[in-house]
Image (cartoon, rainbow, N blue to C red):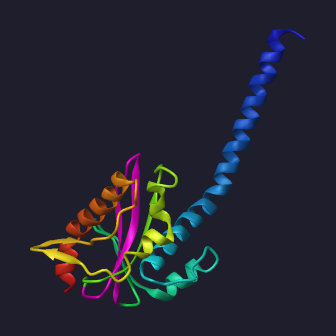
C-alpha cells in the first residue's frame, strides 16, 4: 500500500474520531451543566449551615431552603428567609480561589463558609477545602471598623499566601456587598 493511501486512511480515521468526540461532548453537556449547578447548590446550602447535602438531594434541598435568588451584579441567595449566602472570588498562591459565605440575618455572624481552588499546594493551601479549615468560620462575628467588614480566623500553617488570599477574598467581597447589607437592614 502506498503512502498516499495510508495518509488518506489516517485522515478519514481522524475525521471519524473527531465526529465521535464532538457527538460525545454534545451528549454529555446537559449532564455536565447539571453537575455544575448541583455543585453550586451544595456549596450554597453548606455555607448556610445545612448538612447532609449531596449530588442526589441537592436540587430538592435547594428548592426547599432557597427562598430568593438575586442574580445581579452582586448575586446572593436567601436561605430559609434569613441567611444570606454570597459568592466570593479571589487569588491564592498558584491561581484562583473561590467560595461562598453565609451570613446571619443581621449580617453580623458567619453561619458557614465553603472554599475551593484551582491549583493550591496539596497539604498546604489546598487545605482551604478541608472541613477543619472551613468550620472555623462558623459562628465568627463580623468585625467592623468604620464601614469595613472583616472576619478573623486562623491561617493555614505554611500557606501564608493562600491564607492571605482567603482573608482578602472575604474582606473584598464583604466590602463589595455593603450596598446589599445597607439595602436589606
Which quarter of the picture shows residue 134? bottom left
Q: Nearer the viewer, residue 114 or 139?
A: 139
Q: Nearer the viewer, residue 158 or 94?
A: 158
Residue drawn 51% across the image and 55% down it? 123
User: What is the span of residues highlighted in magenta in the rendered image?
Assistant: 82-106
Report x, y in % for residue 143.
20, 76
Residue drawn 55% across the image and 70% down it? 38
Q: Nearer the viewer, residue 101 or 127?
A: 127
Residue drawn 11% across the image and 73% down it? 147
Which quarter of the picture shows residue 165? bottom left
Helix, strand or loop for the magenta stretch, by majority:
strand
Residue drawn 76% across the image and 35% down it? 16
Against 151, residue 159 (above or below) is above
For the N terminus, the image quarter is top right
For the C terminus, the image quarter is bottom left
Instruction: Classify residue 28 as left or right of residue 117.
Output: right
Residue at the farthest top position:
2
Amino acid at each position: 500500500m502506498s503512502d498516499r493511501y495510508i495518509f488518506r486512511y489516517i485522515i478519514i480515521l481522524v475525521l471519524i474520531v473527531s465526529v465521535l468526540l464532538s457527538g460525545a461532548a454534545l451528549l454529555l453537556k446537559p449532564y455536565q451543566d447539571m453537575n455544575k449547578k448541583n455543585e453550586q447548590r451544595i456549596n450554597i446550602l453548606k455555607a448556610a449551615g445545612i448538612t447532609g447535602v449531596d449530588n442526589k438531594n441537592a436540587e430538592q434541598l435547594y428548592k426547599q431552603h432557597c427562598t430568593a435568588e438575586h442574580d445581579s451584579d452582586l448575586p446572593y441567595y436567601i436561605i430559609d428567609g434569613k441567611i444570606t449566602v454570597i459568592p466570593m472570588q479571589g487569588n491564592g498562591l498558584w491561581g484562583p480561589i473561590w467560595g461562598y459565605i453565609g451570613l446571619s440575618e443581621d449580617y453580623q455572624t458567619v453561619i458557614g463558609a465553603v472554599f475551593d481552588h484551582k491549583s493550591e499546594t496539596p497539604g498546604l493551601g489546598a487545605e482551604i477545602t478541608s472541613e477543619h479549615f472551613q468550620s472555623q468560620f462558623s459562628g465568627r462575628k463580623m468585625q467592623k471598623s468604620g464601614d469595613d467588614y472583616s472576619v478573623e480566623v486562623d491561617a493555614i500553617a505554611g500557606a501564608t499566601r493562600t491564607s492571605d488570599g482567603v482573608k482578602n477574598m472575604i474582606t473584598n467581597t464583604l466590602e463589595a456587598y455593603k450596598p446589599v447589607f445597607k439595602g436589606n437592614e
